[in-house]
Amino acid sequence: MTCSAPCSIKNAQSVLTSLNIADNQIHAEGGRYLGRALRTNDSLSDLNMRLNRLTDEGGRMLFEGLRDNESLTRLNISSNSLGSESTTALSVVLREPENSLCILDLSSNALNDNDVVVLSATLEKNSKIVSLDMRANNCEDEEKLNAINAIVHRNELAARS
């Protein structure tokens, strides 16, 4: 079946602000390409990448691309087998003053106690993250997780005032 109606969207500009590519088997190489695209993107504010099998390498490459991104405020990257490489790259992103991430879902990955220590130290200097989901990772130290929750709660309260 073909459409016989002429296209009436001549010279129209569209801006993509939200992208849900959950459960698409993007893998590590896809993380590389998305990271490259995010370096120059200035309109995307919400990205859902859960369940994409990025692995730690793909997560690292995606986060490396986010270093120069100033528009993304919400990122769901749960269930992607992220680990220490991704945590290190994310910490660099969260230290950038231009970074605008404020809602982050890292649940159901492979983050361990050491990764939580790195994130906690980074978040001490970050006042933008107001929601961070760390459930179902390999972290067993409740004290470290509680420290992160306290920082996020502090940021949330400060954002309300």
Image: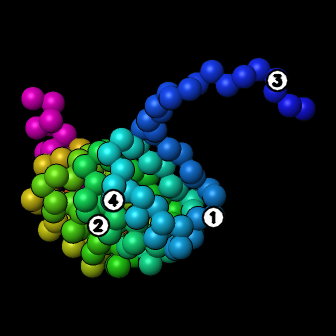
Q: Is residue 7 above or below residue 119?
A: above
Calculate the distance from the C-alpha at mark 3 to the C-alpha at mark 1.
35 Å
Pointer 2 with pointer 3, Cβ within 8 A: no
Looking at the rendered structure, the kind of residue marked 4 is Arg
Looking at the rendered structure, the kind of residue marked 3 is Ser
- Please report whichever mark, 2 or 4, sits nearer to the chain's N-terminal start: 4
Residue receiving disc 3: 4
Residue 158, given in percent of the width and then of the height, sits at 10, 38
Residue 99, given in percent of the width and then of the height, sits at 21, 53
Residue receiving disc 2: 90
Residue 87, given in percent of the width and then of the height, sits at 31, 72
Please tell me which residue is depicted at 46% across the width and 31% down the height of the picture. Answer: 13
Numbered disc 3: secondary structure:
loop
Comparing 159 with 39, the one in front is: 39
Q: Which residues are magenta?
A: 149-161
The quarter holding residue 66 reads bottom left
Please tell me which residue is depicted at 86% across the width and 31% down the height of the picture. Answer: 2
> Depth-wise, is mark 3 or mark 1 nearer the camera?
3
Residue receiving disc 4: 39
> Depth-wise, is mark 1 or mark 4 nearer the camera?
4
Please tell me which residue is depicted at 56% across the width and 51% down the height of the picture. Answer: 21
Q: Is residue 88 above or below residue 6?
A: below
* 67 left or right, relative to 106: left
- Mark 4 closeness class: few <14, some 14–19, many ≥20 residues within 10 Å: some
Quadrant where the image shows the C terminus: top left
- Please report whichever mark, 3 or 4, sits nearer to the chain's N-terminal start: 3
Looking at the rendered structure, the kind of residue marked 2 is Leu
Numbered mark located on residue 25 in the image: 1
